[in-house]
Amino acid sequence: MKSGKWFKLYIAVFLVFLYAPALLLPVFAFNDSSIVSFPLKGFTLNWFNVLWETEALHEATKNSLLIAVSTAIISTSLGILAARASSRYKFRGQKAVMGFIMIPLVLPEIIVGVSLLVVIVQMGFDLSLWTIVLGHVLICTPFCVAILSSAFLNLDQSLEEASFDLGQTKLATFWLVTMPLVLPGVVSSMLISFTISLDEFIIAFFLAGTEPTLPVYIWGQLRFPQKLPSLMALGTILLILSLTLLATAEYFRRRSARKTGIEDAGGFL
Amino acid sequence: MSGFTKWRRSEEASGWLLVSPTLVYSILMLAAPLAMVVALSFWTQDYLQLDKTFTLKNYIEAWSEPIYQTLMGRSLKISAFVTALTILLAFPVAYYVSFYVPQKRKPLWIFLITIPFWTSYLMRIFLWKVILGYNGVVNGSLLGLGLIEQPLSFILYNQNAVVVTLAHAWVPFAILPIFVALEKIDRSLLEAAEDLGDGPLRRFIRVTLPLAMPGVVAATVIVFIPTIGDYVTPRLVGGPNGLMISNMIELQFKKANNAPLGAALALSAMFLVSVISLIFVWLNRKYLVGQK
């Protein structure tokens, strides 16, 4: 029993380590001091007011939202095609093809950023928000494929066969039977890729033209000590936003698991 | 039916057609750009003018200049330490969730472990600066407890800070594959080991650990390869002696305007981490086969 106690203690210490930055974020966001350090001074909402008044931040947020929505739609579409192909059909070279599509998962992001930058510059294109979308779709697609593959694999094929037997075409079956069943997986995939894109910095930093994304803007501000408390407020808002999106994604993922009648195995990734 | 229509309707063709948009995207945005980087690394650049004659100059510079050697060696060392620390931190947690947490609560625990990963990436790194800083949380607590009299200055702006911050960022990615491997272990094997007289420690070393190794190997690769490419963490918490090769790659591509050298450095770094990872995977295969 004694070893079990030590084990629990370790888990508790680990969770403190894991959550330390996330817990400090709101602490400093509401702290009435222009220096981000202890001891705490008092409660204020001032840093949130600063955010509403910063025009550049609003522009960066709009850019990031545009990129994240585009990325979510494109990478989920590409994910649906690949996941459907790999779960429904067997074809030669399948493992190699799927492995290739999943590579960005283990590739350092700097490599993705640098290589896209080289191609775009060589071809004479200008860097813009769309060049960032190209990079983000590349790194989000593997996550979408992973989520959607499990949705498609859990699908009971006899339902589709029943639809064929009742005279529906392939396309109609896909829209009327398959899609509604995997829809929670699709929603979950879109939310995850949206969240990844919204927070991605390394690739965006290489591929951003004159218009910054939210993380690129934050990076520029980190140099100025007087901006730090308002960045903490911004971080708090982003944290709450991410958590809401993820909780929604998790809800849909579980619903997808329930709908297809499979015991929940847990975890997105 | 002609040969082509027949092929068109086959399972083979349906699969290829369906996967092709995603595959084409990956080829255009990943394979082609990577090939371009390889080509670029054999060229030279004089400010904005690109000279496309083949040369090994960039590689000779990347492998012989002391500054690049130092940065490369340090980056590999930091990535190795990060990987080791991440696995050491992650294994007990994965073990706890797999063996101690009731089946129904496991998804919730996995969700809890992945949450901090979704805090803004830049903020997370910056907050480690606040935690480890001179007036930071760690120093504040230690002073408050009376354990130290002066704030510790060796915990921020050096390689230790980089290792801790990166380990924090990557630990969820290590927990998941190890957890999956532990979940796959047939529990009756553990009972068998116990029945045959193995104590808890022997049972762990002879049964649980070898069976969990595929997860550990996956975690190692998932953590080791990408950490070499992080340039934000070294820049924010590393101080002058904590900079890594990616900071140099970024510098060459942006301010120094020497993309070919940057490409050679990036490819050299990728080559080294890939070779080290492959050796590690190979050693494990060999070792695991030996176990049987």
Image (cartoon, rainbow, N blue to C red):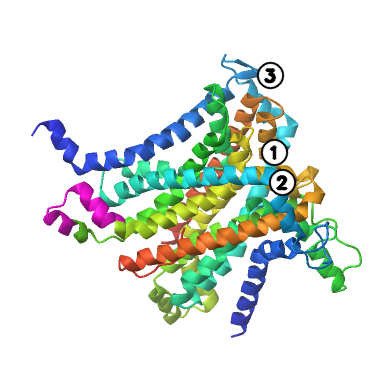
Q: In which quarter of the view is residue A99 placed? A: top left
Q: Is residue B150 visible?
A: yes
Above or below, comparing residue B185 to residue B47 in the picture = below
Instruction: Work out how far the residue at label 3 is from the one at label 1, CA to CA, in angstroms.
Output: 20 Å
Give the residue type that dot 1 points to: Asn
Label placed on residue A268? none
- Magenta-drawn stretch contains A31: no
Magenta part of the chain = A161-179
Q: Nearer the viewer, residue A107 or A267?
A: A267
Instruction: Report, in whole angstroms, how far the alpha carbon at label 2 lies from the one at label 3.
Output: 27 Å
Q: Which residue is mark 1?
A: B247
State whether residue B86 is above or below residue B245: below
- Label 1, secondary structure: give it: helix
Q: Which mark is residue B234?
A: 2
Q: Same chain for labels 3 and 1? Say yes or no.
A: yes
> Residue B263: percent from the left, percent from the top?
60, 29
Q: At label 3, which amino acid type do we have?
A: Tyr
Q: Could you classify mark 2 by the number of other residues whose Cα lies within 10 Å: few (under 14), some (14-19), or many (20 or more)?
A: many
Q: CA distance from mark 2 to mark 1?
A: 8 Å
Q: Chain of mark 1?
A: B
